[in-house]
Image: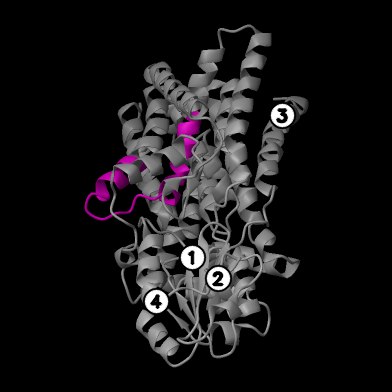
Amino acid sequence: MSVSARGNGMKLPALVFVLALLPRVIDLGQRPFWLDEAFTYQRASLAPWALVKDSFLNHHMPSFFLLVSPFLALGNPQFWLRVPSAVFGALAVMLVFLIARCVAGRMAGIIAALIIGLSPTALAFSQEARSYTMEMALILVALYGVTSLAMDVRMASYPLRSSPLRGAWAAFIFGSAAALDVLGDGMPWIITANIIFAVLLMNAPNRRVLAGNLLVADGIIALCTAPFYVAMTLFQDKGFVDSVMWIPPLNLPRFAYDIGSVYFMRVADSVTFNFMAVPTPEIIIDLIDAALLCAVGLAAWRLRRRPAMLAALGISFLLLPAAFTIVSIWRPILLPRYILWSAAPFAILAGIGGSYMLSGLRPRWRVAALSAVAALLISNMLPYYKVETKPRWDVAAQLLAQEVQPGDVVYLYDLGALPVLKLYLPPGTQTVVLGDSDGDLDHAKMAQAEGKRVWAVYGHAGQSGKTKESARFSAKIAALGTPAQVQTAGKRIFIALYNPPGRTMASACVAGTHVNGCS
């Protein structure tokens, strides 16, 4: 390949990266942290050894937190702690483009990049200060290596030292090991990859050599990752299963939410495990879903004569959600973040199928059709920027800081709100607001009887699959009497003030709030 051709070949992936980064940095610092991101902030603020220890204690690899820790010195943590996720999210889009282009040409790459790049869920994780897009990008590096090997199983069967595909093997080894060193959620990828290689072995001209190459690759990956997982086990006081006990049981609506948000471009509400109410007409969403299904089906049909490639992409897409769904019958574990990386091979397959759909059109009509696809996906993505995807604990903190007085009791529905409130309470107000704050209703009633004011705060700090909790909380706090004042912080949090017996409610009326008995 000439220098100019190589340069031109790199320009388009670079352009894809830049275009994918743009929607990921829009409003990047506008949404407040929620519980998971508050933990990232707290951990990144620690000294390196304390950071490593805290990560291991919580079943996390420290690598992502060590990476983002220096970003705290740059200013607004809501923006800077999310920058790495945005960058890795854009890199994932670029890698999807490269893989799809390698398999089925430039048009397939462009369509696949549009699908994953404009996915509301992929966008949401790219704007969250967590390691999921980093893991996704690294797994895609590994998948790039696997698909390159699947392109020519004969050459993949050469001994590693003399293999013309040493770069592909290196990509598989590096991507897999690095993904595992970022997040334990990468373990299913190792299983997936080895199942793919088992299929490749059936088509290999020299199975013994290919199996030996795989054994060497798996050995290097184990050497690069096992010590960290051994170290993690030394810090544990509870097993991994115990750490995911909060996940609600899987049912049909939950399953539809997980699949619809990860693969079918729905704007997801991560707090309640429901789809967000958006102005996009349902017929447009249904049209997108139907087109994606048709494209993936067509890709599978067209790849039937390339069984190695079909196995590489099909298994990497299907195995993860299928396995997690089956496991969830006994132990709920199916969550969008755990299956996020499998959205990439899904998008690649859809890109391949979409390119075949457009291949029969004349160039002018092909460009018009591609533009229509992009416009449709953009219109579906835009509502994400307008909905409240994160609870407004920043607003709640300001309200409480302004109105809670010394001696007041703050009764929190979700104690997970404590670390988030601590981030947003103005300096000098934590002691007053959180000095007497817990989730004990009996304590709140006793304090009220002693003449103290009680602030009942409803809202989730993290994820919850329970329904109708707001109504149940309202019924529960009826024991405190009639609220003198009710304020809202965004759409997910309400704060009710209960005066002690005998105090008039009129004194609590505040302009601009919803107050019982106030105009």
How much space separates mark 3 and mark 2, taking CA atoms?
A: 49 Å
Q: Nearer the viewer, mark 3 or mark 2?
A: 2
Answer with mark 3 or mark 1, whichever residue precedes in sequence: 3
221 relative to 44, above or below = above
Answer whether labels 3 and 4 touch (C-beta < 8 Å). no
Answer with mark 1 or mark 4, whichever residue precedes in sequence: 4
Answer with mark 2 or mark 4, whichever residue precedes in sequence: 4
Question: Residue tagged by mark 3?
Answer: 6
- What secondary structure is the stretch in magenta mostly built from? helix
Horizontal arrangement in the rendering, residue 474 relative to residue 122 (left or right): left
Mark 2 lies on a secondary structure that is: helix
Question: Residue tagged by mark 2?
Answer: 420
Disc marking residue 415: none
**The residue stretch that appears in magenta:** 320-348
Answer with mark 3 or mark 4, whichever residue precedes in sequence: 3
Query: Quadrant of the image for the C terminus?
Result: bottom right
Q: Callout 4 environment at 10 Å: few (<14), some (14 to 19), or many (20+)? A: some
Question: Residue tagged by mark 1?
Answer: 461
Query: Quadrant of the image for the N terminus?
Result: top right
Horizontal arrangement in the rendering, residue 6 relative to residue 177 (left or right): right
Residue 270: x and y in percent read 47, 52
The amino acid pointed to by label 4 is Phe
The amino acid pointed to by label 1 is Ala
Residue at 67% over, 39% down: 17
The amino acid pointed to by label 3 is Arg
How much space separates mark 3 and mark 4, taking CA atoms?
A: 48 Å
How much space separates mark 1 and mark 4, taking CA atoms?
A: 26 Å
Q: Nearer the viewer, mark 3 or mark 4?
A: 4
How much space separates mark 2 and mark 4, taking CA atoms?
A: 25 Å
